[in-house]
Image (spheres, rainbow, N blue to C red):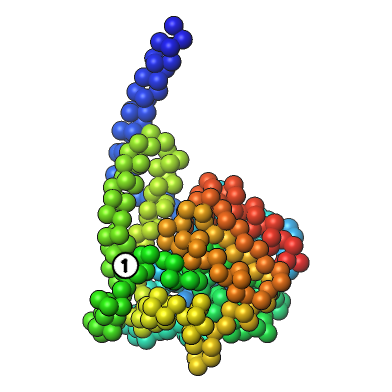
Amino acid sequence: MPFQQTVKERLITEARRMLQRRRNALDYLSSPGPAVGETPKRLLHRRGTLSLYHYQPTADEVYRVPILLVMATTNRAYLFDLTKGQSLIEFLLHRGYDVYVIDWNPPTLAEQHLKIENYVLDFLPDCMRRVQQDAGVQDVTLIGYCMAGILACIYAALHPSGPLKNLVCFTTPIDWSRIGWAKALADPDSFDIDELVERLPIIPAKMIQDAFDLLRPAGRMAGRLRLWDNLWNEDYVKGYRMMTGWGADALPLAGHYYRQITQELVWKNGLVEGTLRIGGRPVRLGAIRVPLLHVLAEHDTLVPPASAEPLMRMVSSTDKEEMIIPGGHVSLVAGPSAIKRMWPSLDLWLGKRSI
């Protein structure tokens, strides 16, 4: 009898889920995706491909040291601010931090000549100064995600006298010899980067996305199958729509910037080999001495932990910590795992260093 009851209960549950799948499928196909990036903010500065925002503080007491969050140059910053209850920015505001964010806009043809120099010797220093002036303080914590972590590291290495107070890097690739997809997509023996940039002065986001899809041809289909299996679950569907929407909302790249990344990081592995020069100056990660937190995703296929781990041994910081958290490249920052694991750990680390 207990076995028969169990089978009956499972059949009833599956029947209910089937009905819910149909309702959610209709909603999925006929309605816009969930609203994202709605935490109140003001535009502090806009300049071409760059927008700097300040988020409205929500805590009665705010830490002295503000945070400047920087998104990867290929993506929109609303990954940090998906929706109420699933927003890293909302979490940080409630915990008493003063939050600023650099978001990127698609580069225009007039910006095709942008290079790493523009980001680390102009954009970042300018935004750091504006945060200092707006917050009325000297110290600023810089947090970079993925490629923005590289820009943050290069900035820190080239500005050892400050005003950087703390450096936080989320899943930041340092050793490009340990990234298999980079070799597959940009083999120097078969990939003519100069010809590509000549033909495409602005590298389309879709070209980059399609290249990744070629490396994982079943990835998109597997995601659709998981969606169907969980279509009865409204929370899952909402999360899926937010994540896939963010992934599809990618940004193009300035051709010269893309070529520089390919030649200096992917081919020459310049950060590890010490060959990278920016504005005529060598980039030495050993020049970084500020407190450092590096957060890695254990199952990250985009930035494998092996490619990110050298950062810890290469910097000269005496106050440094590395966290390896279960999850993938995006779920490290957003989603249930991030809310449970990464966000509290980040708060614990920042709180002691933001006074």
Q: Residue at x 73, y 66 (%)?
A: 353
Whether residue 260 is visible here, answered yes or no, is yes
Mark 1 highlights which residue? 184
Whether residue 27 is visible here, answered yes or no, is no
**Relative image position of residue 323 (x, y in whole percent):** 61, 58
Total marks shown come to: 1
Quadrant of the drawing holding the C terminus? bottom right
Using residue 191 as the reference point, say whether residue 76 is left or right of it. right
In this rendering, the answer to whether 162 lies above or below 177 is: below
Q: Residue at x 62, y 61 (%)?
A: 322
Residue sticking out furthest to the bottom: 280
Task: Work out whether residue 239 or residue 271 is closer to the camera in this orientation and state it.
Answer: 271
Q: Using the rendered view, name the quadrant where residue 40 is placed.
A: bottom right
Q: Residue at x 48, y 85 (%)?
A: 275
Q: Using the rendered view, name the quadrant where residue 96 is placed.
A: bottom right
Q: Amino acid at mark 1?
A: Ala
Using residue 316 as the reference point, say whether residue 201 is left or right of it. left
Q: Using the rendered view, name the quadrant where residue 184 is placed.
A: bottom left
